[in-house]
Amino acid sequence: MASLKDTLRKKIEEHRPRTARLLKEHADTKLGEVTIGQAIGGARGVRCLVTDISYLDPEEGIRFRGKTIPETLAALPKAAGGQFPTVEAFWHFLLTGDVPSEDQVRDVVRDFRARRPVPQYVFDVLRAMPRDTHPMTMFSAAVLSMQRESVFAERYRKGMSKSEYWEPMLEDATTLLARLPTIGAYIYRMKFKSDTPIASNRELDFGADFAHMMGIDKPYDDVARMYFVLHSDHESGNVSAHTVHLVASALSDCYYALSAGLNGLAGPLHGLANEEVLRWTQSFMESLGGKEPTEEVIRQALWDTLNAGQVVPGYGHAVLRKTDPRYISQMEFCLKHLPDYPLFKVINTIYKVAPKVLMEQGKAKNPWPNVDAQSGVIQWYYGVTEYSFYTVLFGIGRAIGTLANTVWDRALGYPIERPKSLTTAMLEQAAGLK
Ligand code: HAX
């Protein structure tokens, strides 16, 4: 049986000539032009990043290694006694593009288990922070605190050839990823469950151990697996993925890069939107004082939000132009496991009304829901009602895709990222205004 690392080495060796040929023979081929609107407008649609790990089609949504979400979930080996694939199987798949065999998954699970123990100093760092610190700040700080253990940084200091960079990057990425569930669950129980952390059970896979350390029974193990897979990757241009890629392009190690990416994920227009959705929904429900959340009442609340100059959280997207398939996957989960749950019904009613309201307002290019509109309901149903924690869950998932990308970035020798800026006067000149 080929190990994950051996399979990856073979894939990298096969891939390198493709990148080298494109650079050598086709470096001047144009992929598009950049407009003033794009330069001012957050580089929307500028094609200047490369990744083979996932691709986001505006109409279809995400494909991981060429597979849609349902295809990915169907293809990968499932966790024992579960309906969803293990995170370990998905990690193998994202890194190599191959669906792993059961034996290969077992091998990755074993490797993750060995790397799982979190050093005491990380918990000390968390405990030293004021208890009302946002969970994302704690999470990012915990990741950063482990930078001293980076094998990549150590090997770089000692001198290492560029062709070898990916190996210590893989080493760091795997260790870091394996530790994240313990750190996340520790933050949760320290902050919200009267400081009663639960020790890891090394017999369990990534998702099941997370559920165990959160103190939540089945099927939360499957919820965790589903959640982490769905939130893993959304090609390279979103704030968290791009930040990880950018920071790592300076040859900063995985710890620096992921911590930076998490800080971007913590913004309300990005990952924090899942917290905002629940905050918005709860405050709206409270304002009803027990009255029925009818379509008409929801329509009014949405208009109140827009008229106050605020965004409707969980709706809109910079690339997608349809309902996010990650939203649909979670909605299907809800229909199966919690069809009559009142909060799910409210979220579904918002889905009926919000796109029409956003279309009527006419500003958002995409009036449809994104992943964040649905994810909090599932957490709430299983007892995780502390919504400031939701982005940490997103962060654990997002680490899978972004860390896999950093390994490939180093394998393919992608250089330090450095787009060019212009002054406003230069834009005016280009526009013929000066
Ligand atoms: N509610 C109200 N207005 C919205 C809106 C929404 N949900 N989505 C977009 N708009 C507005 C924008 O604020 C912008 O207004 P201005 O012209 O006044 O600046 C206008 O519509 C055009 O924006 P756009 O081109 O459609 O959207 P962007 O690519 O600029 O932004 C966002 C994409 C996701 C940031 C945006 O849709 C938004 O703010 N949504 C709400 C927050 C949210 O759900 N974020 C999570 C997105 C998914 C994700 O990253 N998850 O982590």
Image (cartoon, helix red, strand yellow):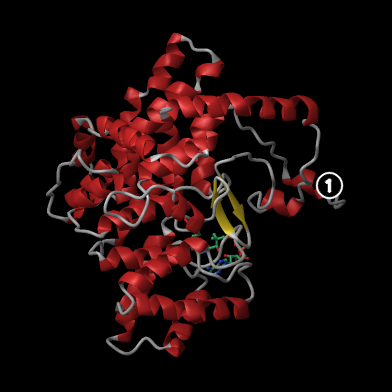
Residue at screen point 46% across, 47% down = 264
**In the rendered image, the vertical position of residue 163 relative to residue 145, given as above or below:** above
Q: Position of residue 123 (x, y in %)?
A: 20, 37
Dot 1 amino acid type: Ala
Is any part of residue 148 visible from this angle? yes
Q: Position of residue 207 (x, y in %)?
A: 29, 48
Is any part of residue 413 visible from this angle? no
Residue at screen point 48% across, 29% down = 7
In this picture, residue 252 sits left or right of residue 42? left
**In the rendered image, the vertical position of residue 375 relative to residue 253, given as above or below:** below
Along the line of sight, which residue is nearer the eye, 100 or 120? Answer: 100
**In the rendered image, the vertical position of residue 71 relative to residue 297, given as above or below:** above
Residue at screen point 40% across, 75% down = 347
Image quadrant holding the N terminus, namely: top left
Residue at screen point 84% across, 51% down = 431
Q: Residue furthest top?
A: 158
Q: Quadrant of residue 278?
A: bottom left
**Where ligand 1 lies, by quadrant?**
bottom right
User: How many numbered dots are placed on residues in this image?
Assistant: 1
Q: Secondary structure at mark 1?
A: helix
User: Dot 1, crowdedness within 10 Å: few (<14), some or many (≥20)?
Assistant: few
**In the rendered image, the vertical position of residue 138 relative to residue 414, given as above or below:** below
Looking at mark 1, is its residue's CB closer than 8 Å to ligand 1? Answer: no
Along the line of sight, which residue is nearer the eye, 366 or 114? Answer: 114
Q: Position of residue 16 (x, y in %)?
A: 63, 25
Q: Circle 1 is placed at which residue position? A: 430
In this picture, residue 187 sits left or right of residue 367? left
Q: Position of residue 166 (x, y in %)?
A: 49, 24
